[in-house]
Amino acid sequence: MDQKIIEEKIQTAKKAALNAYAPYSKFRVGCVVETHAGNFYEGCNVENISYGLACCAERTAIFKAASTEGPSMKLKHVFVAMADHKEGAPCGACRQVIAEFDESTMVYFKLGGETKTMTVSQLLPCNFDKL
Ligand code: THU
């Protein structure tokens, strides 16, 4: 994917982070996913007073995509950004959820002063799968 488009989508993810419901961590995360069908879905993290029930931005966006397109939904690109921090990588749980919807999905995020472009398999080698 063109570097200019990647940066634009990361900016869109950053805007999506402004909708985060994060009164406990105050850590606002946003995500944009593109499916193989060519549709884009945005998500943000949604927390709960029962802390463990928080849903990450990535999963909010992915579940939006899956519940809109149905069981054939496959992820092509996932862009992640933080509203208040320059950098941050997707958590392990979200990597497993991305892998569910295509192990060759490309994931984009800022880390170490650069934009990382990695497949979910690179981010989560040996992910859990049915044997
Ligand atoms: N969070 C995400 O939304 N995505 C990640 O990949 C890592 C963490 C959220 C969960 C929680 O609401 C807040 O960031 C602090 O952990």
Image: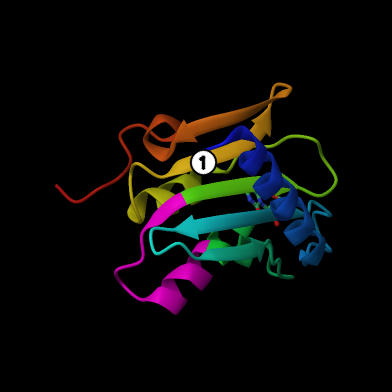
Where disc 1 sits, the SS reads strand
131 or 38, which is in the foreground?
38
**Residue found at x 38% / y 58%:** 36
Q: Position of residue 120 (x, y in %)?
A: 42, 39
98 or 49, which is in the foreground?
98
Q: Position of residue 119 (x, y in %)?
A: 42, 35
**Residue found at x 54% / y 60%:** 59
User: In the shown orientation, is residue 12 left or right of residue 69?
Assistant: right
**Residue found at x 69% / y 40%:** 7
Q: Is residue 131 above or below residue 116?
A: below
Question: In the rendered view, how is the structure colored?
Answer: rainbow
The amino acid type found where label 1 is placed reads Val
**Residue found at x 80% / y 35%:** 86
Q: Quadrant of residue 104?
A: top left
Q: Quadrant of residue 28?
A: bottom right
Residue 126 drawn in magenta: no
User: In the shown orientation, is residue 26 left or right of residue 95?
Assistant: right
Q: Position of residue 41 (x, y in %)?
A: 57, 65
Q: Position of residue 17 (x, y in %)?
A: 76, 57
Q: Which stretch is magenta?
A: 62-76
The residue that disc 1 covers is 107
